[in-house]
Image (cartoon, rainbow, N blue to C red):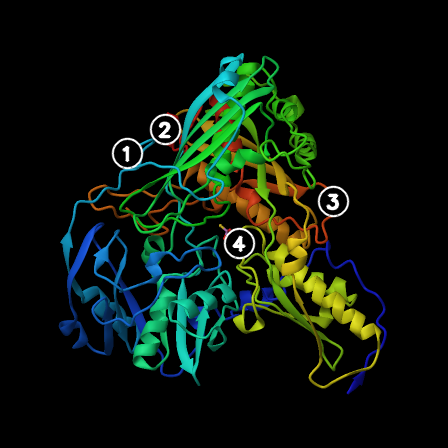
């Protein structure tokens, strides 16, 4: 028993740079990732994916493979345990790929058709590669194009929003931009591939995973396998990147199926090509943007029609047309997201879903309009700054877009810019600069947390948060320390264990905001308890929080982070190569918890924006529907040599009414970055690129 002593108030951890708490463990290899954690009697599952884009599995030749060394089992649609995907999960109806091996239909290339389980991973792989699967192949359709037959507007909320008479306002406009933009299929293959290990232990299912939300995965698995939620435990201590891809997927389900069937621990690791095939991607988009403006650039008409694709089994929509809804005032403001269902894998959330491709189209179109009107691109944005939500009519919680442009323009040296294109030359390089706006919505979701005062004077925070590389564990430590008014070295934050209770997943830039709120509430309550005095029992004194109610009480507002992106490019007139020379992003993202990791998030997003602008493009073979070169050699991403000086910073963005004030920095960094680069290429060369990536062959 220890007696509580009144602590000297210590605050100010939030807002001060702090290196990652697990940083040393990660760089020394002491931090174990999901695929590295040892299990006794572990069996290894290797996935076999379909090689056809549409049809049925006629048969699986299991006998020869079962005779191979070490092979324990081959699971497929003919022998797999039943699962039930008829539920509504945390993010809606499950993707039918979770109902793995429940029927013989193949809806796309890369659909799981078998799992070979063996004593070693090498034996499983050899057998999986030897397994012969016979198909009845059908004609497939994988051709994505604007307005192609089958394109429709989904029923779900927010797909179409319209205010005012668009055609009338376009007719009354002195300047009109009407252009089509395209972005290709893009992949978010993280450094750490997807891997899950499942085992039964004393009537409990335990899954060691790499995911964005352990309570999310646990609840999906419980529903799929009709298990008592309390009997499922999912842990995901360290995660080597996720970006929207690490939700419930077939490999976790298969690890559970195999562990159940074989009554021993089973691990399923995806190979790099399987990551490309199985875990989702960003749909290609075609986007038509129409802007109509008065001679002074004031917008009369704003129209954004976006189209993406989904699979035949699940409707996922890349909501590119959402981007403009909070951005610019216009008398008529129309936005619609359409989708077409093809014989292709289901796309999914990829960093700044919707906003990343949507901002490329809208922010390029704004640049086109600025040129037509003869107005500076920043002045054009200022002229169309809305007082309230352009479509919703709701007040903004805080809106500091123009402060971002002001600070960005000053630091970038925008005032000296000659707007005329194609004038600056340095040897064989044409030089240009460009800018674009960024925004991302600020949302929050219910989470629970527990904070314990330990008998030794330290504090333990427990929350099912996920640190997917963002620095969430560190951010929560700073938040807890300030709320407890103790130094950070007295706080230990434990995350990513579904036994800690329900919490929001790491997604939608809502993680730190959602978890931070729950941690703050529990920590403050604990502090109240401690101030009452008394002994701390040996097991500690715990306070718990659940933010469901306080979140419900938030006022109706437009809540967004904003940003201004700047880029300078050099274009080689002989090869068509575009080199980005520097990028600057200034953001208004509320309270910055840890400047060190927040800056990394923003620079990471901007780097991806550079990659999106110049390099990334997944190519599919129309004859087979499969990806060409589905690995990090074939899928070109920006390398170190492509990435110049990138600077990210922020302006003050207080929101007096918001109890947390955190807006999130996970996604906004990529938003607008590709448009700023495309606008700079236009400024350098006089050529407008409306299709990404801006490859050398397109530049020439
Ligand atoms: Mo993010 S794409 O919301 O995981």
Which residue does the image show at 40% across and 66% down from the upper left? 195
Query: Disc 4 vs disc 1: which is toward the camera?
Result: 1
Q: Is residue 92 visible?
A: yes
- Quick one: label 3, few (<14), some, or many (20+) residues within 10 Å? some
Residue 698 badge? 2
Query: Disc 2 vs disc 4: which is toward the camera?
Result: 4
State yes or no: discs 2 and 3 in contact (Cβ < 8 Å).
no
Element under disc 1: loop
Sequence order check, earlier mark of 3 and 1: 1
Query: Disc 2 vs disc 3: which is toward the camera?
Result: 3
Residue 507 badge? 4
State yes or no: discs 3 and 4 in contact (Cβ < 8 Å).
no
- Quick one: label 1, few (<14), some, or many (20+) residues within 10 Å? few
Give how far across and how far down residue 232 sits, in percent: 46, 74
Mark-to-mark CA distance, 1 and 2: 28 Å
Sequence order check, earlier mark of 2 and 3: 3
- Queried on whether the Cβ of the residue with tag 4 lies below 8 angstroms from ligand 1, the answer reads yes
- Quick one: label 2, few (<14), some, or many (20+) residues within 10 Å? few
User: Relative to residue 342, is residue 573 depicted above or below?
Assistant: above
Which residue does the image show at 67% across and 38% down from the upper left? 396
Sequence order check, earlier mark of 1 and 2: 1
Tell me: 286 left or right of 446. Answer: left
Q: Is residue 516 visible?
A: no
Sequence order check, earlier mark of 3 and 4: 4
Sequence order check, earlier mark of 4 and 1: 1
User: Relative to residue 41, is residue 210 depicted above or below?
Assistant: above
Which residue does the image show at 58% across and 21% down from the upper left? 299
Mark-to-mark CA distance, 2 and 4: 34 Å
Mark-to-mark CA distance, 3 and 1: 48 Å
Q: Which residue is mark 3?
A: 654
Query: Disc 3 vs disc 1: which is toward the camera?
Result: 1
């Amino acid at each position: 028993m220890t007696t509580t002593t009144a602590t000297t108030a210590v605050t100010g951890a939030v807002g001060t740079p702090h290196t990652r708490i697990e940083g040393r463990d990660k760089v020394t290899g002491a931090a174990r990732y999901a695929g590295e954690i040892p299990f006794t009697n572990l069996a290894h599952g290797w996935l076999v994916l379909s090689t056809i884009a549409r049809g049925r599995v006629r048969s699986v030749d299991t006998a020869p493979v079962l005779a191979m060394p070490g092979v324990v089992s081959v699971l497929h649609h003919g022998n797999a345990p039943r699962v039930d995907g008829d539920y509504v999960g945390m993010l809606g109806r499950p993707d039918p790929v979770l109902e793995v091996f429940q029927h013989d239909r193949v809806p796309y290339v890369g659909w799981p058709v078998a799992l070979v389980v063996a004593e070693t991973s090498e034996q499983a792989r050899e057998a999986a590669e030897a397994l012969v699967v016979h198909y009845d192949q059908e004609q497939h359709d994988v051709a994505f194009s604007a307005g192609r037959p089958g394109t429709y507007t989904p029923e779900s909320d927010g797909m179409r929003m319209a205010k005012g008479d668009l055609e009338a306002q376009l007719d009354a406009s002195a300047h009109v931009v009407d252009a089509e933009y395209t972005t290709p299929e893009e992949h978010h293959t993280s450094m750490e591939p997807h891997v899950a290990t499942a085992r039964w232990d004393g009537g409990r299912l335990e899954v060691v995973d790499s995911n964005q939300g352990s309570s999310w995965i646990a609840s999906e698995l419980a529903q799929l396998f009709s298990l008592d939620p309390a009997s499922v435990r999912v842990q995901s201590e360290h995660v080597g990147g996720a970006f929207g891809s690490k939700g419930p997927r077939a490999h976790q389900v298969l690890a559970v199926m195999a562990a159940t069937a074989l009554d021993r621990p089973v691990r399923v690791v995806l190979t790099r090509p399987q990551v490309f095939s199985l875990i989702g991607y960003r749909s290609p988009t075609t986007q038509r943007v129409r802007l109509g403006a008065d001679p002074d650039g004031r917008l009369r008409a704003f129209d954004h029609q976006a189209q993406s694709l989904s699979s035949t089994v699940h409707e996922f929509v890349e909501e590119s047309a959402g981007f403009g809804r909070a951005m610019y005032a216009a008398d008529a403001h129309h936005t619609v997201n359409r989708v077409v269902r093809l014989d292709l894998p289901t796309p999914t959330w990829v960093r700044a879903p919707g906003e990343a491709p949507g901002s490329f189209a809208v922010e390029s179109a704004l640049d086109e309009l600025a040129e037509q009107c003869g107005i500076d691109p920043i002045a054009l944005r200022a002229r169309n700054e809305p007082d309230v939500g352009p479509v919703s009519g709701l007040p903004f919680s805080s809106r500091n877009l123009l402060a971002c442009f002001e600070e960005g323009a000053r630091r970038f040296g925008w005032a000296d810019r000659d707007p005329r294109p194609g004038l600056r030359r340095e040897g064989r390089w044409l030089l240009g600069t460009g800018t674009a706006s960024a925004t991302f919505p600020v949302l929050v979701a219910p989470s629970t947390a527990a904070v314990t005062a330990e008998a030794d004077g330290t504090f333990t925070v427990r929350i099912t948060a996920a640190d997917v590389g963002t620095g969430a564990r560190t951010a929560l430590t700073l938040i807890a320390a300030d709320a407890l008014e103790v130094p950070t070295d007295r706080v230990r934050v434990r995350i990513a264990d579904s036994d800690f209770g329900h919490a929001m997943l790491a997604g939608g830039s809502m993680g730190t905001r959602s978890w931070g709120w729950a941690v703050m509430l529990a920590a403050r309550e604990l502090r109240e308890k401690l101030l009452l005095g008394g002994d701390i029992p040996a097991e500690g004194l715990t306070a718990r929080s659940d933010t469901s109610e306080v979140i419900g009480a938030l006022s109706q507002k437009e809540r967004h982070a904003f940003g201004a992106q700047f880029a300078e490019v050099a274009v080689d007139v002989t090869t068509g190569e575009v080199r980005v020379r520097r990028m600057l992003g200034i953001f208004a993202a509320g309270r910055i918890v840890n400047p060190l990791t927040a800056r990394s998030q923003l620079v990471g997003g901007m780097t991806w924006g550079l990659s999106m602008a110049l390099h990334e493009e997944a190519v599919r073979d129309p004859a087979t529907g499969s990806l060409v070169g589905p690995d990090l050699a074939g899928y070109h991403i920006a390398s170190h040599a492509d990435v110049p000086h990138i600077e990210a910073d922020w302006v003050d963005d207080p929101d007096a009414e918001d109890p947390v004030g955190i807006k999130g920095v996970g996604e906004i960094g990529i938003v607008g970055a590709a448009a700023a680069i495309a606008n700079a290429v236009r400024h350098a060369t006089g050529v407008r690129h409306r299709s990404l990536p801006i490859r050398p062959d397109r530049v020439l």
